[in-house]
Image: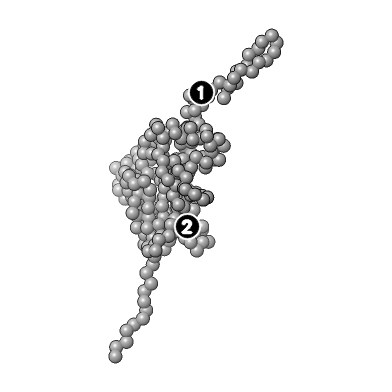
Amino acid sequence: MAVGVELRHNSVVKIKSAPKTVHEDGRTRDLIARSILENGPSSAIALAQRLNITPSGVRRHLDCLVADGVLETRQAHKAISRGRGRPSKVFLMSDQGREKFEHSYDDLAVSALKFMSLHVGEDAVQSFAAARAREIEVKAAPLLSKSSKKTAALAQFLTAQGYAASSQSHPIGEELCQHHCPIAHVASQFPQLCEAETEAISRLLGTHVQRLATIAHGDGVCTTFIPTPQKISTTRKVRS
């Protein structure tokens, strides 16, 4: 906040602090929105710590961003909830918010892929998607090789890449959830990116996986199901 100063008879008199300008508020809200875009769904406390802003100040800006349709709210996922008691509310980017903050980058990426498809052919887009998936594999493989819980390790890796991922165990398998997708808008027009990424996940985990939902197709989260491998009985019946 700007502090006014008035000179009076060679003395300095402090005047009450002036309120923050609309420009300052807009800049702070932009920082908060971009932090959520880059890190995925976040609570007010996490944002306050990340941006060094008071929790009450963050909540004021979050309320405005929700009212403007830039952000949405939901209950925190179990895997990212912390502490006792009721899970805290988290804030995530809405479709309107993604369009606002990712529009320029997405337009460039979509234009480049459309150019490749038109002038080189669909195979070029497929090759690009496969190469991107291979890069994910190369980066993730060392981390997974050191862990016995590969799905959890993959979720940790994807979170570091901006996917805000988590894993959860079920009686019949595991579930890998990506709560944020940095390329959602591009992938909605070029599903080859999602398909290649799914194949990369399958290779990293060494088993068949199934994509149940994707942000690119309008779902709230990308969900990949990893079934528990079935044990094959080696017992043979002996004829009497």
Q: Is residue 92 above or below residue 61?
A: below
Percent coordinates x, y for residue 72 in the rendering: 40, 39
Q: Secondary structure at mark 2?
A: helix
Question: Which of the image's four quarters has the N terminus?
Answer: top right
Q: Residue furthest top?
A: 9
Picture residue at 47% right of the left edge, 37% below the top:
34
Q: Does label 2 or label 1 sit earlier along the sequence?
A: 1
The residue positioned 30% from the left and 47% from the top of the image is 121
Residue 65 appears left or right of 10: left
Where is residue 148? Give x, y as percent.
50, 63
**How is colour applied across the structure in the image?**
one colour
Q: Reply above or below: 179 against 56.
A: below
Mark 1: give few (<14), some (14-19) or many (20+) Cα within 10 Å.
few
Residue at which label 2 appears: 152
Seen as rendered, the residue at the extreme front is 85
Give me the residue at 30% from left, 48% from top: 122
Q: Is residue 49 left or right of residue 63?
A: right
Query: Disc count in the image?
Result: 2
Identified at 52% across, 42% down, the residue is 46
Give the alpha-carbon distance from disc 2 to disc 1, as whole Å. Answer: 44 Å
Q: Amino acid at mark 2?
A: Ala
Quadrant containing the C terminus is bottom left
Determine crowd level at label 2: few under 14, some 14-19, many 20+ residues with C-alpha closer than 10 A: many
Q: Check disc 1 and report its element: helix, strand or loop.
A: loop
Question: Looking at the image, which is closer to me, 59 or 166?
Answer: 59
Q: Is residue 56 left or right of residue 198?
A: right
Q: Which mark is residue 210?
A: none
Residue type beneath disc 1: Thr
Judge whether 100 appears above or below 209 on screen.
above
According to the picture, the residue beneath numbered tag 1 turns out to be 21
